[in-house]
Image (cartoon, grey):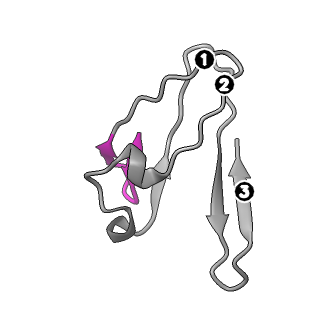
Amino acid sequence: MELDSNGTRVATAIVPLGPKGLVQTAVAALFPGIDAAGLGSFTLQATHAADTLFAYGPIVDNASGDPVFAGR
């Protein structure tokens, strides 16, 4: 689910994932109809029924080009 800076739901995507599975997907691939750059800041919310999900996202530091990973 993608939320804009006001917390309003903009789009929802379902990504099937098997046990101990790993998926890496670009925001543009999940939400092809959304202009992510035009939104400015946004939040991706990942949920799982069994509450056993680890999600992370790389953020590129524009000054150094280094990736920084944010995970929960």
Residue 13 picture quarter: top left
Q: Amino acid at mark 2?
A: Gly
Q: Quadrant of residue 55?
A: top right
Q: In the drawing, what numbered circle is on residue 21?
A: 2
Q: Which mark is residue 7?
A: none
> Residue 35 placed where, x, y %?
31, 62
Please, is residue 34 above or below residue 46 in the view? below
| Measured Cα–Cα span from mark 2 to mark 3 | 19 Å
Q: Position of residue 16 (x, y in %)?
A: 49, 23
Q: Three-letter amino acid code at disc 1?
A: Gly
Residue located 49% across and 46% down the image: 44
Q: Which residues are magenta?
A: 1-11
Labels 1 and 2 touching (C-beta < 8 A): yes
When the figure is inspected, residue 50 is found, relative to residue 29, above or below; the finding is above
Q: Is residue 43 left or right of residue 65?
A: left
Where disc 3 sits, the SS reads: strand
Residue at which label 3 appears: 69
Q: Which residue is mark 1?
A: 18
